[in-house]
Image: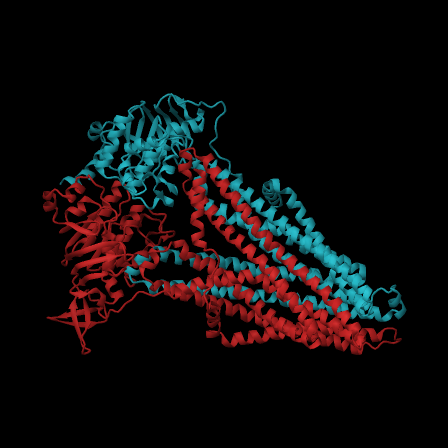
């Protein structure tokens, strides 16, 4: 069993990681666009400063050599040495170095602003787009997957922007300038260095390739160990109850040993990368020295040639250092670009389509006509544009009609077939049926979390596709099975339903939802901070807040998904009362789990495999002795 | 402070275990590599001075060969220490992870409650990774950098002691400046990372509650909230990074000051010497040596910067190490007794004046003076409001917690005297917050009994009314359960958990609100099956619904940690106000 579990755990890992980080084409240039869009001038200055600093660095070091060769050596043996020229050169070198320091300081500071701002822009674009994505996007991904865009991927990007990018630029500049200088001295020797560098690169590449394979399996093993730890610790109490500790240890040890060997292999190669590259550089140095001296001795004017060989030797050092540096960072750049690619992919996701042009407005009733006003009146109307540019107003009443609706989440498996129903203003319609019968799906369609494939849904006689999505959703209240609260005070959470509600309105809504009495007893009352999805409240109390939140929005149509979780009897009664008050006077579509809710509905829809198999009032359905009767008498689970 | 840190090192170093050899060899190899790296530029200088400038091909070959040999050694030492460091750190991490995990396995419920699940997971994952990184840093970079500066300093001293003194003057100033800058920037970065948590929190809430956000049309408000935090993070990081920009300024200024000072003072020394001294090698300083001194000064200062960077990273790892040591130091408060009883005679249960507090505080008791006797084979219902102590009461029977006062007996023997495995196999518990693990249904069920045959599995599933729906799955008993059991319904999950417990063939079976999502008819069928198939097992059933317990032999009504009533359904209806109230509120809904 241990083996089987290990296999299962392992099976889950790779799907997430992918075999190798793939980089979409254009990822780099796209990231570059973020820089050039808003920070063109700063970035230009940065590049100039990097160039200045690279040049001054090489120049300064070279001048220092001059100090020794050109000024110290001639002074040797002189009686009263004149230190004037020496002091002057040292001062000159000091100036060069000072320039370098200033240039570095300027570009580091500018780069700090650029990289962090670019990161902020990318982050904001990502979030803004995420808010506009259809529910399908969230339903098909785990929270962890989406979160990792904001954590892991942004983090690697941050490191790349603030560290790797400036290094890359300065390395490139150093390499190019060293190459030019080397070519000027000797073309064949430069050729030799290039061949050697190519060889080094090939060796390093082989190692990187080898280690990246192990890095992937290390990440997988780590994910599976961490996943296993998480699952086991979450079930730790069950482990205790079943005295399963030894088994749990055994399984863990298998995964842990695998992680150990993957980790060893991955780090073994990456650790030895730098020594190998560095010492290949030393080898190259020796070869150049030998070949160079041989050429010099064979040449017509050996003494002069030897001087340039020495300079050339120093240049090869300047050349190969940034080359190894780039190689060393190559892995992290790949990882960062892969992360950026994932982020851009989400930014490129298609947002929710909204072609609706019917809006919801406040109106004042003037006999039969409506007058649009810009303040709260309590009366709402749909503003329907006519073709000639005029508008027609239709009062918001809450009449919902579904006509032959077909729906499938994936285009293959039909979830709803030919669903037809209507809910007149103020009516309560209950949906009952087994898990997977399609109850929740119906509610997902009315607020257009998903769009139907066939059939029509009308709201007050208007096809919902013509209504602007925001306005449609504002006119629909939702209380979901799972209560989601936000970090913030209780007041803020209730105000989620309507952001301009006054404190009095908040309290009124809480009273209606039966939440007022428990809120009042909290030490900070309505200003109590909720964190972690309201973890400090009981399940029932959280439901009461969700009801208050829906109540303050005061929509004409409510969609309710009753919670199934068991709460203690007293709170349950409060929740039920709150729900009942919320439903009063509204069109209500309810996924019912409580018999009392079902019974006093105007119409009950019994769903089975996406079809309405029975419909009618409670008494009628009981008399039919069909599925509803069996559900009601407890023969089936009411879920 | 110091002593606790020593303590931490001692505790953590125990986990090096069988990887002592690579752990000790790594720093030695690093040191050897450093020596090679210091020697190589010396030979290079010679190669230029004595070989190339002199045009002596034989010297070029000789020194070239020396250089190649040194490079090969350096390569060898470098690559090997890469290998040994990987071996040691991966091994250390393995042992540490194992040690922690095994420790947690031995935790009691009280220990688990103390840490919370989420924090335990962080300690076993993120914190271990942090400490592992620190470990590798300690064996490599933290050896390399200080050693490098020492060797370079010694070499510089050998060339010219008076010039090398310059470093002694510059180093402390520099070290202080660098440390100041980094620690200040580090503080800002740490604070910013806490802001990051806030950002992640906004994202996570939005992802989890997208339906709420969309249905209240609050996308724009949430975006505003996000961008506000995002802006703060951006500004804080800019401040930190700008401060970090001072680093190369200080660093370079120090390096160049050293270099120029060495050049100027060195020049004076060289010039005052006779050319003959330089030629015959008796001079205190030659031009070539001056150049070498300059490269040493760069090496020393660079290494110092590395040291200060690393020590800051180590402070972050220290926080992780502290959290790990906290877990390691935690003593499980429930231990197997010596000469433990390994047989449970029957399923009788006795509570003798039991009081219990989760925090071991007599003023904050969750159970007060509970005194109850249950005969073997009886079915007992337990009812009461949230926080009345129902779960606490049953947890004491299988000794998941130890009583604060009084005693609990099972089969006539105090639970403290039993071998824990014996006790917990005979007292099967179906927890309120129950968990299925990723794996097939079969694998999950066999938690109850590893050696159960397929027939056994089917038998208990029939008892728990689970066989029917399992047979309905395409893969039947081999159906794969996702982590957390998300691919079965709540009622199905509960029935699987009951079946799993039944497989133990226990003498006592406890159901802690385990049929709340099961429909009333199936619930009744389960109870009937219990009565008929396992009549000798004592059954304790906690429930919210009265109809789940009304046919029990006796019912316990708990209120505020005390027994409010104990009797049959009929008796309680007559005598117990709480019971009556609950009964009425539940029946009113479905009968009126």
- Residue shown at 48%/28% (left/top)? B336
Left or right: B140, with A241 as reference point? right
Q: What residue is drawn where x is 68% and y is 63%? A: A281
Q: Quadrant of residue B423?
A: top left
Q: Which residue is more in the foreground, A155 or B11?
A: A155
Q: Chain letter for red, please.
A: A
The C terminus of chain A, quarter of image: top left
- Which residue is located at x 65 percent, y 53 percent? B79
| Residue A427 sits in quarter | bottom left
| Residue sitting at the far front | A298
Q: Is residue B298 left or right of residue B339?
A: right
**Vertical placement of residue B20 versus A456, above or below:** above
Of residues A146 and A438, the one nearer the viewer is: A438
Can see residue A553?
yes
Chain B on-screen colour: cyan
Q: What is the x, y in percent for residue B421?
A: 43, 29
The answer to whether residue A610 is left or right of residue A267 is left
Q: In the image, residue B420 lies at what x, y percent?
A: 44, 29
Above or below — where is B32 with respect to B444? Answer: below
**Camera sees residue B566:** no
């Amino acid at each position: 069993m241990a083996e089987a579990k290990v296999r299962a755990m392992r099976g889950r890992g790779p799907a997430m990681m992918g075999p190798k980080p793939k980089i979409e084409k254009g990822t780099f240039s796209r990231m570059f666009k973020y820089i050039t869009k808003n920070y063109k001038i700063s970035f230009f200055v940065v590049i100039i400063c990097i160039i200045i600093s690279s040049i001054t660095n090489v120049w300064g070091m070279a001048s220092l050599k001059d100090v020794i060769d050109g000024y110290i050596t001639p002074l040797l043996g002189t009686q009263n040495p004149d230190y004037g020229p020496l002091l002057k050169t040292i001062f000159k070198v000091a100036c060069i170095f000072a320039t370098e320091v200033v240039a570095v300081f300027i570009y580091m500071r500018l780069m700090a602003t650029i990289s962090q701002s670019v990161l902020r822009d990318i982050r904001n674009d990502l979030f803004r787009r995420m808010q506009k994505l259809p529910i399908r996007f969230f339903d098909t991904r785990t929270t962890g997957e989406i979160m990792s865009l904001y954590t892991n991927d942004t983090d690697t990007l941050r490191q790349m922007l603030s560290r790797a990018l400036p290094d890359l630029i300065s390395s490139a500049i150093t390499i190019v300038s060293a190459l030019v200088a080397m070519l000027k001295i000797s073309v064949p020797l430069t050729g030799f260095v290039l061949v050697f560098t190519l060889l080094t690169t090939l060796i390093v590449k082989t190692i990187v390739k080898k280690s990246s394979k192990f890095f992937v399996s290390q990440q997988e093993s780590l994910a599976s160990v961490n996943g296993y730890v998480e699952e086991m610790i979450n079930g730790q109490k069950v482990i205790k109850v079943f005295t399963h500790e030894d088994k749990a240890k055994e399984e863990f040890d298998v995964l842990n040993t695998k992680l150990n060997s993957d980790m060893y292999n991955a780090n073994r190669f990456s650790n030895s990368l730098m020594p190998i590259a560095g010492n290949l550089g030393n080898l190259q140095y020796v070869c150049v020295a030998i070949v160079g001296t041989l050429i010099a001795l064979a040449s017509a004017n050996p003494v002069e040639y030897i001087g340039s060989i020495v300079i050339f030797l120093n240049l090869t050092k300047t050349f190969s250092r940034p080359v190894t540096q780039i190689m060393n960072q190559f892995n992290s750049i790949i990882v960062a670009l892969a992360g950026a690619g994932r982020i851009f992919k989400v930014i490129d996701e298609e947002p929710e389509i909204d072609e609706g042009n019917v809006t919801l407005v406040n109106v004042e009733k003037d006999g039969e006509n409506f007058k649009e006003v810009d303040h709260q009146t309590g009366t709402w109307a749909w503003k329907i544009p006519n073709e000639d540019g005029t508008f027609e107003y239709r009062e918001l009443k809450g009449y919902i009609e579904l006509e032959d609706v077909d729906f499938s989440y994936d285009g293959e498996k039909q979830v709803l077939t030919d669903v037809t129903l209507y809910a007149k203003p103020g009516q309560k319609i209950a949906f009952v049926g087994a898990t997977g019968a399609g109850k929740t799906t119906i509610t997902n369609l009315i607020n257009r979390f998903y769009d139907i494939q066939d059939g029509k849904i009308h709201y007050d006689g208007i096809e919902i596709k013509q209504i602007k999505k925001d306005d449609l959703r504002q006119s629909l209240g939702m209380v979901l099975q799972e209560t989601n609260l936000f970090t913030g005070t209780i007041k803020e959470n209730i105000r989620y339903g309507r952001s301009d509600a006054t404190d009095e309105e908040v309290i009124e809504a809480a009273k209606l939802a039966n939440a007022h009495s428990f809120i009042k007893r909290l030490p900070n009352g309505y200003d109590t901070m909720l964190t972690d999805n309201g973890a400090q409240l009981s399940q029932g109390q959280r439901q009461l807040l969700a009801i208050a939140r829906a109540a303050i929005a005061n929509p004409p149509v409510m969609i309710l998904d009753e919670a199934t979780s068991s709460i203690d009897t007293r709170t349950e009664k409060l929740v039920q009362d709150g729900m009942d008050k919320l439903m009063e006077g509204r069109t209500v579509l309810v996924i019912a789990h409580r018999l009392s809710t079902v019974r006093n509905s105007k119409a009950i829809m019994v769903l089975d495999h996406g079809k309405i198999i029975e419909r009618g009032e409670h008494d009628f359905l009981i008399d039919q002795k069909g599925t509803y009767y069996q559900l009601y008498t407890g023969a089936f689970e009411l879920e | 402070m110091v002593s606790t840190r020593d303590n931490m090192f001692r505790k953590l170093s125990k986990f090096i275990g069988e990887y002592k050899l690579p752990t000790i060899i790594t720093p030695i190899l690093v040191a050897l590599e450093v020596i090679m790296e210091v020697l190589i530029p010396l030979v290079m200088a010679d190669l230029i001075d004595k070989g190339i400038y002199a045009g002596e091909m034989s010297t070029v070959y000789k020194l070239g060969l020396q250089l190649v040999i040194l490079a090969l050694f350096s390569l060898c030492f470098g690559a090997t220490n890469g290998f040994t460091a990987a071996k040691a750190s991966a091994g250390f991490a393995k042992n540490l992870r194992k040690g922690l995990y095994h420790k947690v396995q031995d935790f009691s419920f009280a220990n688990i409650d103390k840490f919370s699940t989420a924090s335990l997971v962080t300690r076993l994952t993120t914190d271990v990774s942090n400490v592992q990184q620190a470990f590798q840093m300690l064996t490599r970079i933290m050896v390399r950098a200080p050693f490098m500066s020492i060797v370079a300093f010694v070499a510089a001293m050998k060339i010219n002691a008076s010039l090398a003194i310059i470093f002694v003057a510059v180093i402390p100033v520099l070290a202080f400046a660098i440390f100041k800058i980094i620690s200040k920037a580090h503080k800002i970065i740490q604070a910013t990372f806490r802001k990051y948590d806030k950002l992640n929190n906004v994202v996570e809430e939005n992802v989890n509650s997208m339906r709420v956000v969309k249905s209240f049309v609050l996308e724009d408000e949430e975006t505003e909230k996000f961008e506000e935090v995002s802006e703060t993070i951006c500004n804080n990081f800019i401040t930190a990074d700008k401060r970090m920009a001072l680093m190369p300024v200080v660093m370079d200024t120090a390096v160049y000051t050293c270099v120029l000072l060495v050049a100027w003072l060195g020049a004076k020394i060289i010039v005052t010497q006779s050319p003959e001294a330089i030629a015959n090698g008796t001079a205190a300083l030659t031009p070539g040596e001056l150049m070498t001194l300059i490269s040493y000064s760069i090496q020393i200062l660079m290494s110092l910067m590395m040291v200060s960077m690393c020590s800051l990273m180590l402070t972050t790892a220290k926080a992780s190490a502290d959290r790990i040591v906290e877990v390691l130091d935690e003593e499980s408060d429930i231990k197997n007794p010596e000469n433990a009883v390994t047989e449970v005679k029957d399923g009788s249960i006795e509570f003798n004046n039991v009081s219990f507090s989760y925090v071991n505080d007599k003023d904050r008791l969750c159970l007060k003076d509970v005194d109850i006797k249950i005969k073997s084979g009886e079915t007992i219902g337990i009812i009461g409001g949230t926080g009345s102590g129902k779960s606490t009461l049953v947890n004491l029977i299988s000794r998941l917690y130890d009583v604060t006062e009084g005693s609990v007996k099972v089969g006539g023997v105090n639970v403290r005297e039993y071998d824990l495995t014996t006790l917990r196999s005979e007292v099967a518990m179906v927890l309120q917050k129950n968990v299925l693990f990723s794996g097939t249904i079969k694998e999950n069920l066999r938690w109850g009994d590893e050696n159960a045959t397929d027939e056994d599995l089917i038998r208990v599933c029939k008892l728990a009314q689970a066989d029917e729906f399992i047979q309905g799955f395409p893969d039947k008993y081999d159906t794969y359960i996702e982590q957390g059991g998300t691919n079965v319904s709540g009622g199905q999950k509960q029935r699987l958990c009951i079946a799993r417990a039944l497989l133990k063939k226990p003498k006592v079976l406890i159901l802690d609100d385990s049929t709340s999502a099961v429909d009333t008819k199936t619930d009744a069928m389960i109870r009937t099956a219990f009565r008929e198939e396992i009549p000798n097992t004592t059954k304790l059933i906690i429930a919210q619904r009265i109809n789940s317990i009304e046919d029990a032999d006796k019912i316990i009504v708990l209120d505020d940690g005390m027994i409010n009533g104990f009797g049959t359904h009929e008796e309680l209806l007559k005598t117990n106000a709480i019971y009556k109230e609950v009964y009425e509120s539940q029946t009113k809904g479905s009968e009126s």
